[in-house]
Image (spheres, grey):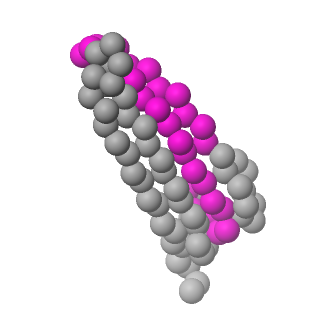
């Protein structure tokens, strides 16, 4: 497969409105794997896997906080 790069990305999340003291909580998970090839902008790096686990909190209409963890592993020439 000369000249082609591909991978996949999966994302899932939930919303808990007014979970505690009127704060909306939204946990989510994102998983990805770069299956084959390399892209010029570095968004696909063959063999790389990545994940993002996050928790977002909305305090009313104007204030939001988010905590996230993003491990990245594997891949030839992976600079992350």
The kind of secondary structure the magenta stretch mainly shows is strand
Q: Is residue 27 left or right of residue 38?
A: left
Question: Which part of the image, by quadrant, shows the N terminus?
Answer: bottom right
Residue 40 visible within the image: no
Q: Residue at x 55, y 34 (%)?
A: 68
Please say whether residue 46 is one of the residues in the magenta stretch.
yes
Looking at the picture, how far across and down is residue 47, in whole percent?
67, 68
Looking at the picture, how far across and down is residue 29, in whole percent?
48, 47
Q: In the rendered image, which quarter is residue 65 located in?
A: top left
Looking at the picture, how far across and down is residue 15, in whole percent?
31, 37
Q: Is residue 9 shown above or below 80?
A: below
Q: Residue at x 60, y 75 (%)?
A: 36
List the single residue furthest toward the front.
20
Comparing 35 with 13, the one in front is 13
Q: In the rendered image, which quarter is residue 43 located in?
A: bottom right
Task: Count numbered badges in the picture.
Answer: 0
Give the magenta part as a residue range: 43-70
Q: Is residue 58 left or right of residue 5?
A: left
């Amino acid at each position: 497969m000369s000249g082609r790069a591909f991978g996949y990305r999966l994302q899932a999340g939930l919303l808990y409105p007014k979970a505690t003291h009127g704060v909306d909580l939204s946990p989510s998970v994102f998983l990805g794997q770069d299956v084959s090839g390399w892209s010029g902008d570095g968004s696909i790096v063959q063999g790389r896997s990545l994940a993002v686990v996050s928790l977002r909190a909305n305090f009313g209409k104007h204030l939001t906080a988010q905590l996230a963890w993003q491990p990245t592993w594997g891949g030839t020439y992976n600079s992350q």
